[in-house]
Amino acid sequence: MAGGPAVELVGVTKQFGDVAAVDDMTLAIGDGEFFSLLGPSGCGKTTTLRMIAGFEYPTVGSLKIHGREMGLLPANERPVNTVFQSYALFPHMTVEDNIAFGLQMRKVASNEIAERVRRVLDQVQLQHRAAAKPSQLSGGQRQRVALARALVNEPEVLLLDEPLGALDLKLRQTMQVELKDLQERVGITFIYVTHDQEEALTMSDRIGVMDNGRLLQVGDPAAIYEHPASRFVAGFIGDINLVDAVVTGSNEVKLSNDHVLALAAERPTGAAVTLALRPERLELYDPDETIPDGHYRLAGKVTRKLYYGDAFYYDVSVGLDRPLEVKEENRPGVETYELGDEAVVAWDPASTNVVRD
Amino acid sequence: MVSETATAELEARAERAESRRGVLVGAPPFAYLILFFALPLVIVVVYSFASRSSTGATILGEWNLDSWLRVFSPQVAEIAWRSFWLATTTTFFCLVFGYPFAYWIATRSPRARALLLVLVMIPFWSNFLVRTYAIRFLMGVEGPVSVISQALGGEPVRVLFTNTAVLVGMIYGYIPFMILPLYAALERMDWGLVEAARDLYAGGWTAFRKITFPLSMPGVVAGSVLVFIPSLGAYVIPAILGGSNTVLLGDYIVSQFLAARNWPFGSALSTAVMIVMLAATIFYFRRGGRTL
């Protein structure tokens, strides 16, 4: 089994009535990988997770875990465990009994159960809450119990369905780090479903972006962020400027303000393309300032300025349908612009992504 | 700026005004309950200490414990035991038949659920007495059960006037009181918990035993109380379906008031039954940890 993928989906479709919640999905997730399924609600990411868990069955396609076809195997016979979005802790059982549940079901000897429960409670630092009922715990503690309850079984794959969704921002950020650490320590394959791009970027080894039941792009966080393949992926992850352009030659595209950029779009002449530009890759210059050679430049006027504390966000109108958003970090001595100031937006051609519609 | 004591004073005044409004709203139903519920109850209790003249009139003033001593006689104990046994059996069967049905309703689509609940309640739209007489026909010698048996070459079957007839009638009459609270409990179930149990290697039956059933306990307790209590004092169903073979607490009490004309003894019996029921109810809810 070594080297083979932990989870493999081939041509998986899940049909609910006329709607394909998941549409012809093919994906291999490596052993020990932290893989995130990212997308807006209703994109099919949770359905995909539920199919791996065994709560739903594919309408067509093959789903394997460590090379073994899952078919119609019920959830209780699959080597996976789930951390549910609402935690789904058993309210009538103590923390300890919740965690021991899976081991008891598998008829593990009771002294071993006690030992493993104690160890996992240690791991999530909840030894002192072992006898508490879930209703007596804070949100963060419940989250840890849910995690412990799944991990104690040492599953081949751990499925996490937006496990941090119910926590407040600070706790969520702490838990992101803890989850990632934990995953590296235990070495179990994590499949993490989220609609939060930041979560996906910070924790994952690889991300699969989904929309409308389709898997649009799979790649490591940097690839997804720096080189989005489609307009949807570009727009869903982070802030982005999407600029319409038309290919006018083998090495040039024309923007809607008739400005021509030297850019190999690798599309036939006359084709409409979209350029995706990250706000932090754009820079603002005074009209008389020297701009590095080879940088694209568009002159315009500042129409909006937002102070974010760590950064300034400017809207610069350059004659396109929409103003360009530019992010400038709030470093000492950074030059700031005011509303109505003339400015030039410039950027490195390498930061320009041509994306599919 | 308002000082702290002044604020407290204002708050207290607002609270008093609030409670005055509460009294105004609560007064009419309160008066109604006092007049038609509490007062008759007091009369019953008072009568249980009165004595009976040789003609059957109740003599107030000659207070004594004779009726209460009779409540503890072996004859009453036998009737009480029979009633208790019937109520327990009824409750048991209502639970056994009602639980799967309530579970089934609770797991339908919301639209189907509404329809099924109406079906459960339809019997309440017609008179209880009429329905019981209809059952009487079904169980009689000319009833369908008997007719089918004879058509198949068997003997005529008469279920009517047997203990089985009473039990069947009681289950029929009280099962909605079991189904409704069970449904309420199951409808609130978080089915995600069952999924979690399945995810943790529990089979379907085990998940039910470990998760669904324990979490529906409040419904089981409420339904059992709602069936057990009226079953214990049931009068109409045993009277119509059981004939005179089986004397139960209900008909025994009625006969004290009507046939024997012994109102003090009837009152003492009623009061005793009420006390037992009250104790049972309190015990149940303490155990269940919930109120209705």
Image (cartoon, coloured by chain):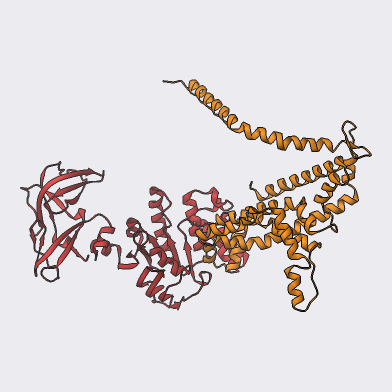
Q: Position of residue A91 (x, y in %)?
A: 56, 54
Above or below: residue B109 compared with residue B19: below
Q: Position of residue A274 (x, y in %)?
A: 18, 62
Q: Is residue A185 left or right of residue B230?
A: left
Q: Is residue B73 left or right of residue A232?
A: right
Above or below: residue B225 compared with residue B172: above
Q: Nearer the viewer, residue A122 or A312?
A: A312
Identity of the residue drawn at 43% across and 73% down? A58
Q: Chain B appears what colour?
A: orange
Q: Is residue B50 left or right of residue A291?
A: right
Count of marks overlaid on the render: 0
Residue found at the far left of this picture: A288
Q: Nearer the viewer, residue B152 or A68?
A: B152
Q: Position of residue A260 (x, y in %)?
A: 7, 60
Q: Check the picture and name the quadrant holding the C terminus of chain A.
A: bottom left
Identity of the residue drawn at 49% across and 63% down? A151
Q: Position of residue B204 (x, y in %)?
A: 57, 68
Q: Nearer the viewer, residue B50 or A103?
A: B50
Q: Check the picture and name the quadrant holding the N terminus of chain A.
A: bottom left
Above or below: residue A352 compared with residue B127: below
Give the quadrant of residue A37: bottom left
Residue A339 shows in the view? yes
Residue A31 shows in the view? no
Q: Nearer the viewer, residue B164 or A212?
A: B164
Q: Indicate the chain coloured red by its letter.
A: A
